[in-house]
Amino acid sequence: MAYPYRHERETLVIAKHFGDAEARPLAGYRERGGYQALEKALSMTPEEIVDVMKASGLRGRGGAGFPTGVKWSFMPKEKKGPHYLVVNADESEPGAFKDRELLRWTPHQLIEGCLIGAYAMRVEHVYVYSRGEFFEPAQIVGRAIAEAYEAGIVGERVLGSGPRIDMTQHLGAGAYICGEETGLMNSLEGRRGQPRIKPPFPAAVGVFGAPTTINNVETLCAVPHIIANGADWYRQWGTEKSPGTKLFNVSGHVKRRGNYELPLGFPLRDLIYDVCGGIEGDRSLKAVIPGGSSVPMLSADEIDIPMDYESVAAAGTMLGTASVIVMDETTDIVKATRRMVEFYAHESCGQCTPCREGTTWMAKIMRRIENGAGRPEDIQTLLDLGKNMTGTTICVLSDSTAAPVNSSIAKFREEYDAKLAMAAKTVGTPDSTAATSALAH
Amino acid sequence: MAERRDWAGERGDFARLSEAEVRGESYVGERPLDGGVPGSACSYPYMLEEKQPEAPLFEGAYQARFEKIMSRYPERGGALLPVLNLAQEVRGWLSPESMDRVAELLELSPMYVRGVATFYTMYNKRPVGRHLIQVCTNVCCNICGADDVMAAFVEATGAEPGEISGDGLFTVIEAECLGACGFPTAVQINSRYYENVGAADVPSILDDLRARDARAVPGWKPDIPLHEVAKDPATARLPDAVEAGRGERRAPRDGGPK
Amino acid sequence: MAEQATETVTATIDGREITVAKGTRIIEAAEAAGIGIAHYCYHPGLSAPAMCRMCLVEVEGAPKLQPACVTPVAEGSVIRTEADKPREARQGVLEFYLQNHPLDCPICDKSGECKLQDYTYAEGRKRGRSLEPKRVLGQDDFGGNIVYDGDRCIMCTRCVRFMREVAQDDLLGVVQRGSRSVIDTFFEEGLDGSPFAGNIIDICPVGALLSTDFHHKARVWDLDRTPSICASCSQGCNISVDTRDNVVQRLRPRANSAVNSYWMCDYGRTNYEWMNPAARLERPHVRDRRSEAVAAGSGAASGAAEVGWEAAIIALVDRLSAVDNSASILAVGSPFHSNEDNALLLRLARRVGGSVHAVFRSPRAENEDVLPGFPTLVRRRDLAANVRGLELLGFERVGDDEARGGLDGADAAVVLVLGDPLADRDAGFADDAELFVYLGTVPSQAGARADFQLPVTSHAEEDGTFTNALGRVQRFWQALRGPSLARPAWQVLGVTLAGLGAGAAPATAADAFLSLGEENGAFAGLSYAGLGMRGSQAQGAEPVAAGAGAGAEAP
């Protein structure tokens, strides 16, 4: 069962202790087998750990799905200075609320994963970069780190015999773009959180100029289980290319919103209609965003797909963070899309011209259409802007803005047309105040 | 009267747990004034006390926290975000003077500090009400009625978004995704999340905030500056700390704690 | 030439094969091959943030367009700037800019040299598609003669990077983020007192940073731009003198990596009004003070006679021929005049008399301003262009830091003054001398009493060379027409020397420069044409280190 609702079809690995307040403190975590994986890891060589991670096929859970073991292997084997591991706990993708649950229920699971990763990559300092709004999880993680220091798990000698590894929790201050790994690095260095140009890649020149690996919370939480039980054990779930379990965080118009740990490849339809109990009020489904607001949406007749990286990509969208946003028939798609675009306009760091100007322009057009002041040619303009915002910037925030716009126009054109028809009717009549005032803002 | 739901305890399995069990004792109980625990450089953005502008930015426990933060980064500049968080915690917002002082402490230029401070939305660049209410209106909350919740807060506080209410208590702003999409509408008040908030819950949430203020510092009334009654911060409790007690099962609601 | 063991790579850009040093960025390689890649945020003197996204080019094999300003040329790569994808991307970027950039070119000072205007004209959409109201931010006075126009700003951050990386005076930054970003200083702090801040006006690719000094003075297409050397200190920054209707309107730096990179200081930038003086010496005046003294005794009218150049030179040659060849000569040179002018003054002095005392006076500042990001560039203590040149020629510095004094006790038989306005001397300055020749640009109380008051051109009105504090000999070109009968001093002095039988007069500044090398080792081996636009090092002239200043330190 995962939290706050659980379901019999779940496979609980990392979400096992959700809802179990006793598992949160160090003693409770140890009673449940905690830190045994770390002990095992310390008896292995760093290379062996990386090999197990590679063999497990674990893919980064932050959205991009890059194989974790391969990422770890990019870190230099020879140490010329400090190495850093940074935990990306800047969860801010609309739709995503999985890391917050991991942070607040199983902080020691994260610490254990961090220490294994740090040992494997010869890291001496782990930074947990948590979004600034996560005060509550930060308190819990902060206390857990303190417990781990007191117990000699973190610090001078890890578990009394390992290398020195320190952990520091760092709070951001409100910027979605700091979830992008190079933006995060800038933010951790006390700069404006603007993404950096790659290359150099973080494994070569990362935070404070040193080799750095950045992993998502969920990725690191899976690590102790893989080390403890082996790669083959992890591969019993999921598909060949997307092995293991994943937290599916479902929001929107379902009866039981929440996090559910399921094997990758779990059918989307079953997730919505079985695990989440179906649509609120038993209304009919209109659209689903399968991986957080940055990915193209699916219409109701496109949900018969398995939720693994490849299958979702084959359906023309992305698994992303597996943050499923469900929209029922009452949803105004134009409004929902406008709200997403406004989010990206608000969160654009402002470096690249197409993103800085494009996101805001799109937001203005979307609001105008929503308010009944749209013009037929606006649709083509939106599509053209989307094209000019895709693949032209340092990071993919502007691509992410175009995704919901393009997909909603492609799949729900009639909703746009209805708004445009409304505009056509009001133009030139005394009732056109709404339209003109929309133009004025 | 609508039942006030200021945490997610009324949904699913949360119903059988106390808030302390869900949010952690260190969050729900009385919060240590030294800012938490060793090994954590974080500090938390909300105002503890109102201070005279001429008082040093960091003193006493805050100076210790500042030094702890500084010890956690290989470069001074790395500490900028946590130090700004700390400055905001002391002053409630980041005034030009605070930015200037932080720049001096970290050996950065004031303009650099301003550039960073304005990049992040959680730094208040102007004074805010005693309670900063951030309503998530992003898509997941939005399709579940966040606009109504936002409107309800604006109406109930009588302050335009971003402005301070007449009694100085509230500032309401629209926030982007708070990462609590499964609990719409998510509202962050100061450092605390209120989940599953509906428009009807809003008046009772505000009443409760007022009641907590009265309890946080004995003798404090909304129209008295806090520093006048709380000279010794050690005797003050943080305004939004829940007082239900550690790990205790919370008593059933009857319109908020007495 | 030493063999350079640099590794090279070969690639094609728009079908043209290029070979460049490994690590060269595409934009530089293209530039070297004569292919201009449109850009805003990139500037060769600054770091490249690759954020304007204008310089995106197609590199075969790369999935996305690549920013030419940061991507190194890879061996064998095929790069296209003139293909559909990069062109569409550029058009897209331009459209994004124009969504908010005001179309107020008719009242914008940058119009005519604006990169947004140029690129839009070249490739932009014919009609804008935006129906939305533009963002309005208004103007912000940054101080230091700079006004920021937020509406026009395209957020290339060149100005921020200049202040941070080159001036290392972190006064500017981006405030806010996304489309709400603006450039600002720390609240009301401003840029006042930052000695190199004016450079941000030049590097702003649009009209977002405006000079209050140049505000609405001229349309840039009406300006004549002449390569020159800043005369305001002995650094010798390479500049362009921008004139309209024979009036200097502004000075701007010209790139020279050996002297000033792309920059100049604000003191030099704004110190040009003296080149547009209202009162000038316009015609030669000749008088004979010895006969005047007699005439004065008899009550007859006295005064200088305005004459033509021919009469003046004939009279001057006459008078100089009569000077005893053992007479003591005082030659006062000017650090605001060229090597050629001063060298010929000295040659004339030596031709005429026996003992020559050659001196000059130069204003000096108390301190200097070093540009930290390019420490070669220093606003020097010597506030005149050719102090080093005079020293190399053999002039001795006299007087104080205000360029006063030092000429007392000048009991020379002949006094020759070039350029120095003798502001601290009264009318009786050279009354005891047998002959007083004053070659000047502006009227002077002391000079007015000279036997020969000869109008010469300022450096802005002639061709010539200065030698800067680094020992670098650099050419400047004529930017202004001199007044009436004013002539270059080298010409006046050269013709006079010819009259004295010292060989043919130089016909051009180049001739004058050539003769310089013949008699002074420092200039030997240099040719006027060889100096080109960037100058050459004088022989044996060690650069004066910053901090040392030129000449003897006052105790």
Image (cartoon, coloured by chain):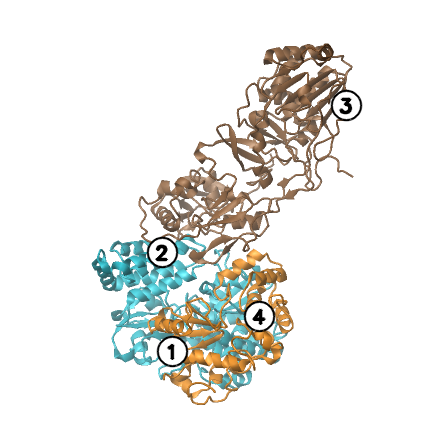
Chain colours: A cyan, B orange, C brown
Question: Which subunit holds the residue at mark 4?
Answer: B
Residue at the (65%, 73%) spot, across then down: B60
Residues at discs 3 and 1 both on one chain: no
Q: Is residue A203 visible?
A: no
Question: Which subunit holds the residue at mark 3?
Answer: C
Q: In which quarter of the image is residue A284?
A: bottom left
Label 3 to label 1: alpha-carbon separation? 99 Å
Relative depth, front residue between C465 and C23 = C465
Q: Mark 4 points at which residue?
A: B90
Label 4 to label 2: alpha-carbon separation? 38 Å
Residues at discs 4 and 1 both on one chain: no
Q: Is residue A3 visible?
A: yes
- The mark nearer the N terminus, 2 or 1, is 1
4 or 1: mark nearer the eye: 4
Residue type of the residue flagged with mark 1: Gly
Mark identifier at residue A258: 1
Q: Name the residue under label 3.
A: C410
Q: Mark 2 points at which residue?
A: A361
Label 4 to label 3: alpha-carbon separation? 73 Å
Residue at the (50%, 81%) spot, across then down: B212
Q: CB of mark 2 within 8 Å of CB of mark 3?
A: no
Q: Quadrant of the C terminus of chain A?
A: bottom left
- Judged left or right of residue B57, residue A312 is left
- Where disc 1 sits, the SS reads strand
